[in-house]
Amino acid sequence: MAGGQVEKRVKYKSSVKDPGTPGFLRIREGMLLFVPNDPKSDSKLKVLTQNIKSQKNTKEGSNKPPWLNLTNKLGKSHIFEFENYPDMHACRDFITKALAKCEEEPNKSAVSTSSEQLSIKELELRFKLLRENSELQRLHKQFVESKVLTEDEFWATRKKLLGKDSIRKSKQQVGLKSMMVSGIKPSTDGRTNRVTFNLTPEIIFQIFAEKPAVRQAFINYVPSKMTEKDFWTKYFRAEYLYSTKNTAVAAAEAAEDEELAVFLKPDEILARETRQKIRRVDPTLDMEADQGDDYTHLMDHGIQRDGTMDVVEPQNDQFKRSLLQDLNRHAAVVLEGRSIDVESEDTRIVAEALTRVKQVSKADGETTKDANLERLERMSRLAGMEDLQAPQNFPLAPLSIKDPRDYFESQQGNVLNVPRGAKGLKRNVHEAYGLLKESILEIRATGLSDPLIRPEVSFEVFSSLTRTISTAKNIIGKNPRESFLDRLPKSTKDEVLHHWTSIQELLRHFWSSYPITTTYLHTKVGKLKDAMSNTYSKLEAMKESVQSDLRHQVSLLVRPMQQALDAAFQHYEADLQRRTAKSGGERPNGYI
Amino acid sequence: MIFKIEDVTVYFPYDNIYPEQYEYMVELKRALDAKGHCLLEMPTGTGKTIALLSLITSYRLSRPDSPIKLVYCTRTVHEMEKTLGELKLLHDYQVRHLGTQAKILAIGLSSRKNLCVNTKVLAAENRDSVDAACRKRTASWVRALSTENPNVELCDYFENYEKAADNALLPPGVYTLEDLRAFGKNRGWCPYFLARHMVQFANVIVYSYQYLLDPKVAGIISKELQKESVVVFDEAHNIDNVCIEALSVSVRRVTLEGANRNLNKIRQEIDRFKATDAGRLRAEYNRLVEGLALRGDLSGSDQWLANPALPHDILKEAVPGNIRRAEHFVHVLRRLLQYLGVRLDTENVEKESPVSFVSSLNSQAGIEQKTLKFCYDRLQSLMLTLEITDTDEFLPIQTVCDFATLVGTYARGFSIIIEPYDERMPHIPDPILQLSCHDASLAIKPVFDRFQSVVITSGTLSPIDLYPRLLSFTPVVSRSFKMSMTRDCICPMVLTRGSDQLPVSTKFDMRSDPGVVRNYGKLLVEMVSIVPDGVVCFFVSYSYMDGIIATWNETGILKEIMQQKLVFIETQDVVETTLALDNYRRACDCGRGAVFFSVARGKVAEGIDFDRHYGRLVVMYGVPFQYTLSKILRARLEYLHDTFQIKEGDFLTFDALRQAAQCVGRVIRSKADYGMMIFADKRYSRHDKRSKLPGWILSHLRDAHLNLSTDMAIHIAREFLRKMAQPYDKAGTMGRKTLLTQEDLEKMAETGVQDMAY
């Protein structure tokens, strides 16, 4: 095992029945490598040790060959057949060691110090949360890695985050932009007639979603018949032909070029989807049903040209597509939202994923009776008149705002924003006051004039008053922290905020540990207390370090934190005293 | 709640009732007692439909000895579904309180296309091909043939229905179209024929206007309804138009070509029959001699659309001798087609009365008036004799025969107009010969004569005295109700100027002015940024909407609108419009917010509600006048002037304003609802236009809101929306009760209705 590496001759089997590929197994501390003898074989394998979940092996003495079965975290297993048992044992021991080492490391993957076995899914969720939320990550690092809290304790208070809701919430998808794809304007270089289109994955996604025919054409043609670039060039050529509204030219070009014709023809996939959807619309909206009921639509019945109807240009021209249709289609796609979870740069993957999604939803539409039932239920609900009956209590849907603080801070910012048009006139309160005073004096001297007060003066006074009032309210109001925070240097601000969250975390754990019923809690409280006093001194230090003009405000900010900590310390001391007093005679309260 | 109106115990499915609903019921009951017709205008958003349904069903319950039947006519299928939805609610309530004796049978009736459950038939694209596909499987001779030839395809649903014969009945209940289909599928019975059959047993029938007004349809579907029926025309403000449409036909060049092809086919069939089955033709001839155009009792599946002329105008005599023989009839039709073709070749617009048209037809083609009159019946008989099932193929010849019968039957109230092209597109030759009806009372007369009570009701029937004249009937009750408001939940405004203070209008000389288009756009851009959820815009016509949206797209205004809300548009394609509406609703439901662009007089304006969050603001761009240069409109105006002394301008304004009121009225559904209405045209500020708006809008139109510019409108909108967001007392304050409870009603019964909150 020199150099922390073993190398053995093995046969690799991807399943039990696989005859196996002969080759070498090389195990290092971090990973496991299988190199087949036949360089052409594709069963080359590389497994990171930390991805291995467990290993099994056949017993010596049983009549089975020496097999080692490694299961990775995805549940896939790799089977290696060794030439003899000692080889296998050597490898097994090595892997065991490597695995143990892996777990010992303060690596994020090593969480199994707790008694309960965590499922892989849960672990992944935790990582995901940590990745997404930097604040949480920081806390985690600070407390778990410095062993103030154990992993489980840390997560125990965040069960909600780990719950089902969060899984769904974390999947909340970003919607599509409302802008029309036709809104993308080509850029020209000014000298030649050449135009350049800048296509982003988002635009491509939209084009594919809105025009299934283009998507289908892409799958059919690229890359077998043309390159992606040619494809898009052709597409925009077709779009250009549309925009010229010259159907004759479009028809002529389409006749020559069958690929171009695909873009110019009416979208058949879309028409099919439409037919599907029309069966599912709310019957109280279904105007299509009228068409079947209205006998005046019988050819040439009813009144044709009385001016109520519009003149319709012949619509049957197949190379004509109206802007209105495009708009409707676009809005429908935006409403549907991003239906696929593929964030790929590869256009083909996107196209295929979209096609798949459409097929699935189509299959759904045919089978689900629930949707139908729900529709009828909805209809009967809407049939009633709302204020003539007792209020119906509809279930509430939770708002999904990712970080409420972002939202409220941005709202507050709006209040403080200077009204439009006043940007050039920023003056402070005193100036405004001065102006007002001046004009009062003027009125005294010259009497009332028209206008009474010059508009800019009144505006000035008004706006600065508004501003003072709103800031004063913020300062005196319930949440003094936020308005000062903006004035603090960024590092200090971050520090304050971080301290605040970490104190909250600590206090939450601290108070939830009482009453202390086990020794485990006892030690935990001890650790927490140490951490808290640590933070306390840090707060003090921060107070000292800030600039003098901000010190007062910072100390105002810090005071409630310190008070909260003080209360905790007090409680700790009191509890400790009571316990030492009690521990002499009887057993501590509730101690089992 | 349960209360008494005089001797009738009314079962009303809600805990509270609006005072105007109560009033409405009282008036309606009086009309029913008097067995007369009535005309009732009540603003939208006050629950007309439910008040009407609960009174009439309760009236029926209180008179068990002479049960009345309710025939409820809606303009569209989706309104029909909505009405049935409300009826379901009511029926559940009544059954809960009264037990099984309150059970009724209520059905919605529609065409084959909407009721068919046979997937093979449904695969056909439009109504006519569905009808034809159905006939191909259900016609009596097809079924007879199938007994010999097992390869002939039949419809299992129809066969099962026929097998069940008289046992095929619907159990009591309220059936929407969807329910009917589900029932039919379940039992294996054809829902269409089942529903048709149940018409005579049902207590409530809900169907579209045409089933009563169009003689072609009414003749087969509504002919067995008893006199003791109450007929209701809901949303009847356009009823005059429906009436004249029902009796109007036009002939184009394609119609003539198609008709010629049909005649060739018929000719071939006749020859074939002559060779194989000459007896049939002879039998037909004998029948015609006896004066029976049709075999006495046709099975339901063989029925055609009935004669286009009204039943009382159809002569009950033998078919004239010169068209009794099939070949002769074909010859007559050929001559008719030829004559029509010659007339279509004109280069000038021609207007003629039916009398002179018939006489020139007689002198030039030798076809008498009486022959013309029988064309339709003769054709129908011939096609049955020839066992033709693909009826959709034969539409052109039917149209021509329709035309012939109408022109032969009516001497007044019609005119024939031949136009070589549409004057708005003079470069495209498209000759058309139109027989247009001007007299709305013709089509509705049999309805008034036949049924004891006809109720005409809508949100906008003002001026209410005009309708009895247009439809020539005498109502026993004619009333317009006001709306009692808990709070000012509607906010109408007249916007006369844009953000640059220049006037806006869709007047012909101004509508394409870029300044006006921009001002209209800016108005919307500002509004979508402050109005939550749904916004609806109505334009005066498709072409105008098309143009303005294209301009907005080019100038970037559309993009600005899209930053706030999704945009959906009504197009000429009904399917697409339906989907757009569906998406619009979903966008409003999910909070994304959307704008819907629509057209006054379009399909959406006619029957789709934009209540609650589906419409917080309606913008009516322009005054939706009819195209006044239209020859048909001119002819109609002339007729109105000569017959009823209605001035041209008055009628046009009345018509435009009822459309505008109809568009904006769609935002309110109940008093808890609220919405703004912007009339964006300077012409609305003029008194002669504005005063034609219904009273419930006028009473909320403050003087200060009569002449606004965009910025002022924005300000008012903000204020209004803020005010509406506050909680309020639903029952009404300060002595004015706008929501009555059971006790209130009982108290009122003691003191007399006069003490009402009005």
Image (cartoon, coloured by chain):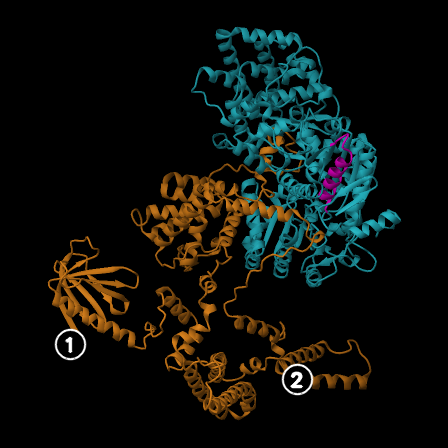
Compare residues A225 and B509 and report the one nearer the observer: A225
User: Would you say residue A312 sits in the magenta stretch?
Assistant: no
User: Would you say residue B67 sits in the magenta stretch?
Assistant: yes
Mark 1 element type: helix
The answer to whether residue A501 is left or right of residue B743 is left
Q: Pinpoint the chain carrying mark 2.
A: A
Q: Residue B429: tell me if it is visible.
A: yes
Residue type highlighted by circle 1: Gly
Q: Give above or below for A4 relative to B242.
A: below
Residue found at the far front of this picture: A585
Q: Give above or below for B300 relative to B677.
A: above
Q: What stretch is highlighted in magenta?
A: B47-68
Q: In the rendering, what colour is chain B?
A: cyan
Q: Identify the disc placed on residue A3.
A: 1
Mark 2 element type: helix
Per the model, the C-alpha gap separating discs 2 and 1 is: 75 Å
Q: Identify the disc placed on residue A429.
A: 2
**Marks 2 & 1 on one chain:** yes
Badge 1 crowding class, 10 Å Cα cut-off, few under 14, some 14 to 19, many 20 or more, is few
First in sequence: mark 2 or mark 1?
1
Residue at image coords 59%, 9%? B284
> Which of the chains is orange?
A
